Image (spheres, coloured by chain):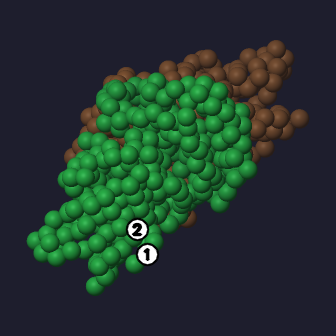
Chain colours: A green, B brown
Amino acid sequence: MRKRVRAFAPATVANVSCGFDIFGFAMEYPGDEVKLTLTNTPGIEIRRIIGDNGRLPLEADKNTAGVAARLFLEKMNLHKETGVSIELIKNLPLGSGMGSSAASAVAVLYGLNHLFQSPLQRTELLPFAMETERTACGSAHADNAAPALFGGFVLIRSYFPPDIISLPVPDDLYCCLIHPDIEVNTGSARKILSPQIKLTDAVTQMGNVAGFVAALCKSDYDLLSRSMEDVLIEPVRSRLIPHYFELKEEALKAGALGCNIAGSGPSVFALCRSEPIAYQVSEAMKDLYDKINLKSEIYISKINQQGPKILED
Amino acid sequence: MRKRVRAFAPATVANVSCGFDIFGFAMEYPGDEVKLTLTNTPGIEIRRIIGDNGRLPLEADKNTAGVAARLFLEKMNLHKETGVSIELIKNLPLGSGMGSSAASAVAVLYGLNHLFQSPLQRTELLPFAMETERTACGSAHADNAAPALFGGFVLIRSYFPPDIISLPVPDDLYCCLIHPDIEVNTGSARKILSPQIKLTDAVTQMGNVAGFVAALCKSDYDLLSRSMEDVLIEPVRSRLIPHYFELKEEALKAGALGCNIAGSGPSVFALCRSEPIAYQVSEAMKDLYDKINLKSEIYISKINQQGPKILED
């Protein structure tokens, strides 16, 4: 049996536009890397974290990477004889809305599964990835974990039991994402949502959700653009993001199909119908944040159809 | 110019399962027929209604057929010189949840448009059909009017402005519908719905809506079946339908993909993956209502891709 592996899992955008808690997609980069080493000493050790500026806990049970490793070993009934030592290379900013916690957990799960000759299907790994999200933000949501694990654009049709549907993606669809240098805690971003909504708003949102799926299936960019409207979440969470509606307007003016909050923010993503448009849109967004002296980073990527990968074994 | 035409528009199922106010489809039969005669005397006359047992108003402004004719003539700016005499053959039961009011209105609109060499697109006729729904039930909903007018399975992505999307339908998909001999008023069925719902229920419903559309696009019957769940409306409106949950159980046991309330009831429809299964399911549903001595009628039909048609001109 192999003893070491280096694995990668990508950034993901959850809550895509109208699809609160049900839509998510994977980006090609950035992503988190893990170096995993199996040991004969039971227990999970996080021996090093690079790229978090010392902010993530090294205690395995408080870190999604550590929790993922423990859940995997327990599932395989190996936790009494085997341990894992983890080095975590965080390329994803924390609290950014880019699925940072899910990426670390999925990289560990995918890497460990590979070390044991892949006894578990991705579908079987998903509950562990979801469970680690509870460690990170108090809610076992799947809209980062599922696209990080399966790649592509996914629908979480149901949570109990999880029912993950891969949706087709038009070939030229690009995402550009801007990450302003502020942090939003996912748990807090969830608490500000009202637990009750209007039935009429739900109908509007359902129409857009249906339009969004039909647009992906038909490669209909105009319909996709019309469907990228969120009447439930954006009005509330946009308050946490500096100059959100101006940013959105700039993105749309520059040619984006639509522009919404990535996950629970503060990152903002736009979908675009070609790479050149994605560059234009990114520039427009970046310019706005530069103008107000808000430090930000830009990522441009196709939808990542592969999900996690093994970098070295 | 032609002076007379006989036109048909089909029964429709609205609020399809999870798709409250956004999904609707047309059946091949039954449907309403109209015989229209243009006259030189301004005004709309309903000269005869067959099949309603004298229950529909002959006053043109209180009848969806009459209102549709008036709106069409006004749009064409012909109302000051031209009149229409209407004979309405109601094959659809009233207050049945089968889109009776929309069928009459659409037959009139489609027939009149044909008489004038089709100056208006179906998209342009839709607002009139929706407006007639306001006459019938107080709400200008489109989920019967749109499928009656366009045929097929439609998504009403948005109401303001109306954005109607045709969804693909798998070849072998059959609908069976049972109409118990009781009546539900659409307006009242709308009033019993709570204007506020839980965000968590909306997420569940959105997941199913998305799953339903993906299933139609992929011809995935298993996914369609899993997505035919309605947590928003069925729990409330099922109270208006005798033995609803038993009926549903019988339909599912007999092989239906799913079974829900047609429109606002009291009709109940099931989707099935073949004609023989649709017959089995119909029998099971009919048996239950026979057992409790509730008179009922059964309709079995493919999805009607054509919509309205001219029967004679």
Image vertical order of residue B44 relative to residue A193, above or below:
above
Image vertical order of residue B44 relative to residue A220, above or below:
above
Extreme residue in the bottom direction: A1
- Disc 2 to disc 1, how far (Cα)? 7 Å
Extreme residue in the right direction: B1
Quarter occupied by residue A226: top right
| Left or right: where B294 falls relative to A82 | right
Out of A269 and B58, give the one closest to the viewer: A269
Residue at position x 33%, y 46% from top?
A54
Crowding at dot 1, Cα within 10 Å, few <14 / some 14-19 / many 20+, comes out as few
Q: Of helix, strand and loop, which one carries label 2?
A: strand
Mark 2 or mark 1: name the one nearer the start of the chain.
2
- Mark 1 lies on residue: A312
Residue at position x 45%, y 72% from top?
A311
- Mark 2 lies on residue: A7
Residue at position x 45%, y 33% from top?
A182
Residue at position x 43%, y 64% from top?
A8
Q: Position of residue B75 (x, y in %)?
A: 77, 23
| Left or right: where B201 falls relative to A267 | left
Q: Quadrant of the N terminus of chain B?
A: top right
Return the chain for callout 2.
A
Amino acid on which the number 1 mark rests in the picture: Glu
Q: Is residue B298 visible?
A: no
Crowding at dot 2, Cα within 10 Å, few <14 / some 14-19 / many 20+, comes out as many
Return the chain for callout 1.
A
**Label 1 near label 2: C-beta < 8 Å?**
no
Q: Position of residue B141 (x, y in %)?
A: 53, 30
Amino acid on which the number 2 mark rests in the picture: Ala
Pointer 2 and pointer 1 on the same chain? yes
